[in-house]
């Protein structure tokens, strides 16, 4: 074999490798058809539950994990951060059927009114939604009659979820500050 022939073979091999490498570099993202991932017709689901936030008493489900040096003197508790694992029930009574848990963080994020930044996963434990989650994020001005937060995603049955959650205070104990909040969640998913 001549040196020129070997050089041509090497050059062809290098070009082939470069072509494969450039295809791989461009293939980090590609368009897919929803059907290829088993996705069918999108549907709208309405879920209603009661969120039990217990910050005092025997069965605490929400605990303060941080506060700013000025939180206690702030009219809005600005800088307060809580982590919660709150039960979600079918009805307003804590003894009604447990359908899930609200696991996440809320923080007092306004200096002008009591408004919480909410970042929660609703983990469902019942029925066709068992094991699925919805991720909810948004602003919750707790003294407004209706508060709306965004459903930003989900897992399981709720893959590709989007929608909104409306919160309405059902009851608040003025002494303990424990609250029950009714949630109506509207979610588009496959």
Image: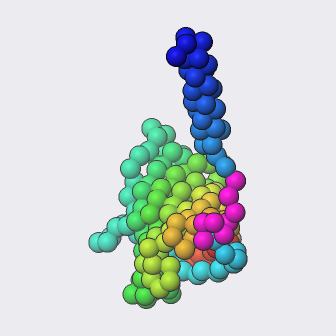
- Seen at 57% across and 30% down, the residue is 17
Name the foreground residue: 24 vs 55.
24
- Seen at 34% across and 67% down, the residue is 60
Q: Can residue 175 be seen in this snapshot?
A: no
Name the foreground residue: 101 vs 116.
101
Q: Is residue 37 magenta?
A: yes
Q: Position of residue 44 (x, y in %)?
A: 69, 78
Residues shaded magenta: 31-38
Q: Residue furthest left?
A: 58
Q: Position of residue 165 (x, y in %)?
A: 64, 70
By what rule are the colours in the image chosen? rainbow
Q: How many marks?
A: 0
**In the visual, does 42 lie left or right of 158?**
right
**In the visual, does 92 lie left or right of 114?**
left
Name the foreground residue: 27 vs 148.
27
Q: Is residue 108 magenta?
A: no
Q: Is residue 8 above or below residue 95?
A: above
Name the foreground residue: 159 vs 77.
159
Q: Quadrant of residue 153?
A: bottom right
Q: Can residue 57 be seen in this snapshot?
A: yes
- Seen at 58% across and 22% down, the residue is 9
Which image quarter holds the C terminus?
bottom right
- Seen at 54% across and 74% down, the residue is 157
Q: Residue furthest front?
A: 1
Q: Position of residue 159 (x, y in %)?
A: 58, 66
């Amino acid at each position: 074999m001549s040196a020129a022939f070997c050089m041509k073979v090497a050059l062809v091999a290098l070009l082939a490798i470069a072509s494969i490498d450039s295809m791989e570099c461009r293939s980090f993202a590609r368009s897919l058809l929803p059907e290829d991932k088993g996705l069918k017709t999108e549907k709208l689901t309405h879920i209603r539950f009661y969120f039990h936030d217990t910050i005092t008493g025997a069965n605490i489900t929400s605990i303060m994990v941080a506060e700013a040096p000025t939180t206690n003197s702030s009219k809005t508790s600005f800088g307060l951060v809580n982590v919660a694992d709150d039960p979600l029930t079918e009805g307003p009574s804590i003894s009604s059927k447990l359908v899930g848990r609200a696991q996440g963080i809320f923080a007092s994020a306004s200096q002008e009114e009591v408004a919480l930044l909410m970042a929660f996963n609703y983990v469902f434990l019942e029925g066709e939604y068992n094991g699925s989650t919805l991720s909810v994020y948004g602003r919750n001005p707790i003294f407004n009659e209706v508060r709306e937060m965004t459903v930003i995603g989900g897992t399981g049955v709720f893959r590709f979820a989007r929608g909104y959650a409306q919160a309405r205070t059902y009851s608040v104990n003025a002494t303990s500050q424990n609250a029950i909040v009714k949630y109506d969640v509207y979610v588009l998913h496959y």
